[in-house]
Image (cartoon, grey):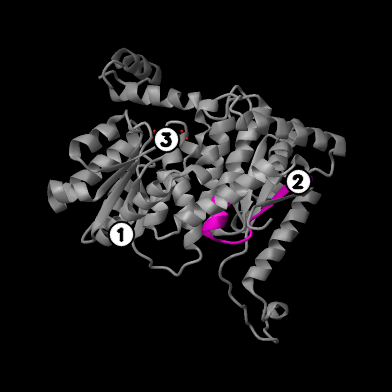
Amino acid sequence: MTHILRLDDTWALDGISRDRVNLANSEAASQLQALLTRTGRGAEYTGWLDLPVATTQDMLARIEATAADLRNRSEIVVVCGVGGSYLGARAGIEFLNSARSAGVTPEILFVGNSLSPWHLSRTIEKLVDRPFSVIAISKSGTTLETALAFHVLRDELRRRYGPEGARERIVAVTERVRGNLRSLADEDGFAAFDMPVDVGGRYSVLTPVGLLPFAVAGFDIRAILEGAARQRSAVTETRYEDNDALRYAAARRLLNAEGRQVELFADFEPFLHTLGEWWKQLFGESEGKERKGLLPASLDYTTDLHSLGQFVQEGTPCHFETVVDVPAPVDVTFTCGASSPDGLAYLDGRTVGAMNRQAMLGTIMAHHDGGVPILRISLPDVTESTFGAAVYFFEAACAVSGYMLGINPFDQPGVEAYKHNMFALLGKPGTEAEGVALRTRLGEQVD
Ligand code: PA5
């Protein structure tokens, strides 16, 4: 089968017996059955399993038509969202943009992914004299970061184009029946796509959350879903010994049981950086609960070989690496002449891509020899189809790995704690007493 992700565990599981590996793989297969039969924890949030084959032609046509309209109106489209309502779209656009030359319009900007006044104000500056539109994405419709940025942008649209013009330049993606973003869409009359109730934020890339920004950026969303569908078949129909998503889930659990507590997503291309951010959120928010889970971290090589590479090679042996291997969509031939005096003549005429590859292979062997288990996941190319396959591969592996760990991979109770305090400190109605108590603990003057 082609155009799906492949796992090489040669340099990760060589210290673990074949019997243990087989047992873990078969346990992963059992947990996949729990996932597919909707009998595991959080089964009410497993709608993502079928998105590649269940998304209707009507929905795709509506996304494409809306995207075409935004593209016609805009030099810039600003996407407001955070967490699962942001990272997948950004990861896909950065991944796929790598195969294009620069300067493609509309430019896609992302806001609402922090409370940074600097970032918001610099983004607004970029919109001066340039026609723009806004996509606001929030499943709950109550996320502060997204809501604040959206209000600022809606005001700017109204100032520039009037209420009617603003209405035509805003599209929301949110839950159908609840939340403030839905109320604003109903009141203002701007277009809104429904976010499926049974798909959580970090598993939502293949809903309008990701598909609308991808279509606006000019990518083929049907090919993305087709690649995801191909990977879905590989996950659900391949026997467990050869099922790479299951083997990846099992390898993570085996290495965790061996005492590894950190998984490093290591890429050798900057256009994979945000895929690493998306992967961190997917695994971190899914597994990190009940005082369990691997800490997911990411490294961009070879840049980080000159930084954290020292720790990876010789530091506290708390980690294993998952090297993500994808051929760059472009290459550069290095020429310096056969008698270059700087010692580089042996590289004359070779491509930088070929050198990057040797750097990757050399790093794998060096880190392995330093005692670091290394998984390698290969993506065949930089295409829409492969991006869709990658999304499904990691989502399925994450859910299975979470079930093997004995947690619910589809909730995120821990993210409420900081919000509770932040809203109390901001004086949200109903939280005044907690705000006072927090300020006292913080040693600040009570207002
Ligand atoms: O994965 C998740 O559920 C979260 O990361 C959410 O996506 C994030 O908190 C944003 O939530 P919302 O889409 O409700 O604004």
Q: Secondary structure at mark 2?
A: helix
Cα distance in 3D space between marks 1 and 3: 25 Å
Please give the label number shown on residue 71: 1
Residue lying at 36% horizontally and 53% vertically, measured from the top left? 109
Q: How many marks?
A: 3
> Which amino acid, mark 2?
Asp
Q: Secondary structure at mark 3?
A: loop
Q: Is residue 340 visible?
A: yes
Q: Is residue 273 visible?
A: no
Q: Which residue is mark 3?
A: 196
Q: Which residue is mark 2?
A: 242
The relative height of residue 413 versus residue 144 in the rendered view (above or below) is above
Residue 26, image quadrant: top right
Residue lying at 45% horizontally and 58% vertically, measured from the top left? 220
Q: Which residues are magenta?
A: 371-390
The answer to whether the beta carbon of the residue marked 3 is less than 8 Å from any atom of ligand 1 is: no
The answer to whether the beta carbon of the residue marked 1 is less than 8 Å from any atom of ligand 1 is: no
Per the image, is 378 magenta? yes
Quadrant including the N terminus: bottom right
